[in-house]
Amino acid sequence: MRLSDEGSWALFLKKVGRPQNSSDINNFREDILRICHGLSPAIMLLGRVLSTMESSEWSRVIDLVVAAHFGKGQLPLSNFVVLSYQMLPYVLKPCFLYLAVFPKAHEISIRRLLQLWLAHGFVQTSPEASVPEDVAKKYLEELVCRNMIEIVRWKPDETPKTCHMPCYLYDVFLPKAKDIGFLDLHHGKSECTSADLLEFLQPFFSFNTRKRDAINGQITFTKIINRGGFLMLKVLDLEGVFKPVLPEKLGIMVNLRYLNLRWTYLDSFPAFIGDLPRLEILDLKHTCITILPCSIWKASNLRHLYMDDVGVSIQKPSNQPPTNLQVLTGLLIGSKDPRIYGLNRCTNLRKLGLTCHSESALKAAKCISRLVNLHTLKLGSIDLVGQPSSLVLSPLEYHQSLSNLYLYGVIKDHQIGNLPRNLNILTLSMSLLTEDPMRVLGKLPQLRVLNLFSDSYLGQEMTCHADQKIQNFPELRVLVLWALMKLELLKVENGAMPQLRELQIMDCDKLRSSEGLDQLPALKDLILRNVPQDFVEAARRLGNEKITHQLV
């Protein structure tokens, strides 16, 4: 459906980022409305292109679109699509075309996409922007801003989770991606050997996590290995392939930078991992691997190491790990001092997932407190049989950069005040708190997402206070209460959580009543699952428009 002139101009002004009374661009109104013909995609693409330049340059761009239309007789939308690509900075063009290797409209994990950009060398750093991961995020933001990439799903903290190439762009640029060789190996052509091309292998590139046939995977994998150019591969992405057999020949892939085995359910990992000198990203999450060979420490260029959250130990810890590590998750150190693993030397770490025993909890917290670049931490404490044990929080209190914190383990009530002040996301699980933590947690000024998971709180009543001097939970957007088995009453005082948009309550078997939920002015989504019928009926009286999903 085409937009009216008024609607078209309003959308254009929004995309170009200019106020309606800008006299310098009103002179272009007639031409822009004429060439866009009320097509929303055309308006968005043109608006974003023009937003990157001065209005004095607009005439040249508009003339290009007009000339293309009348000179070649193309459909108007095709002209804007081609123009948007032509006007992209050269560093963004391969990043954009890369999305065409995924199926049309397929949701692509942002994590996966950025890592693949990095592994292929698409990301260019500079003295002013020296961290590749940061530059990759900027590339994504720019492509989203230009309407070349569309965000499909968002995380609770309002950061993007998945994306895709808009369908009207995909149809145009899939042939372009084929022409430059991005899809040669993806479609099974064996003559392509350039290391700059995309090394996705169709039998090993999974778009779901269902089990694959391991024998067929092995046969196809052997055929791929025997092809020319196999040793030139930079990327091997086997995500979702069920228990692929990793041949020893992988150990001689000297150019391999990215090895993704997520959701493969592998039981073990071969020792040749240390023979991959350029390996930067190794993803072993959602596998059955519990021990990694000590040769992992020889991968000196490793930047991202994802292991399963259950906890993976590494044979013969080294106090000289790869110093470029940005991400290290799923590490199980048990009762060992984390310095044995050289964590105190990993000063570039931004994301850490660590499980310890209570004997090493204090040393772990002290070590973490010195990782000044760390912004995401998942810290767990378990005993010898895997049950939650005590955490120590006091060394973390003054950590300035930590913004996302997940704690699994027992927390003494007085320790809850030792949480870092700059948290945006906080998750507590198996904390076994006996005193209501909400008054203390409400004083975290930047907290936007609060998850209180299984037995994090053992009390019968929970109150979200509204102090007159200090507003509690001033920025909280999402609150999740899950498996608080003794909770019977939830109170919300008038003025508390003024920005709360989503409240999820799940598996709280004894929750009978609430007070003040109708005093949450920003609440849009109230999600109830497996809670008593009395509570559901009380929630209904808030108005059905606020209950978006309900399973009793």
Image: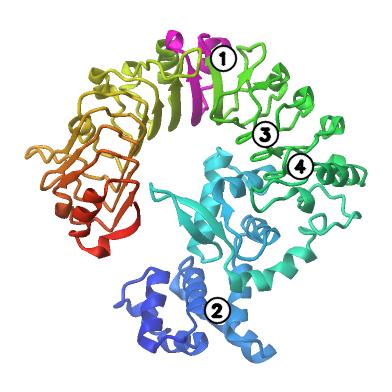
Answer few, some or many: residues within 10 Å of disc 2's Cα (few below 14, many 20 plus, some between 14 and 19): few
Q: Earlier in the sequence, mark 4 or mark 3?
A: 4
Amino acid type assigned to the residue bearing label 1 in the image: Gly
Amino acid type assigned to the residue bearing label 3 in the image: Glu
The answer to whether 2 is drawn above or below residue 491 in the figure is below
Q: Which residue is mark 2?
A: 60
Q: Nearer the viewer, residue 539 or 348?
A: 539
Tell me the CA gap for discs 2 and 3: 43 Å
Q: Which mark is residue 280?
A: 3
The answer to whether 91 is drawn above or below residue 44 in the figure is above
Amino acid type assigned to the residue bearing label 2 in the image: Arg
Mark toward the viewer: 4 or 2 = 4
Answer few, some or many: residues within 10 Å of disc 4's Cα (few below 14, many 20 plus, some between 14 and 19): many
Q: Position of residue 93 (x, y in %)?
A: 65, 60
Q: Which residues are magenta?
A: 334-360
Q: Which residue is mark 1?
A: 342
Q: Position of residue 496 (x, y in %)?
A: 16, 45
Q: Which mark is residue 234?
A: 4
Mark toward the viewer: 2 or 1 = 1
Q: Name which quarter of the figure residue 316 lies in.
A: top right
Tell me the CA gap for discs 4 and 3: 10 Å
Amino acid type assigned to the residue bearing label 4 in the image: Lys
Tell me the CA gap for discs 1 and 3: 18 Å
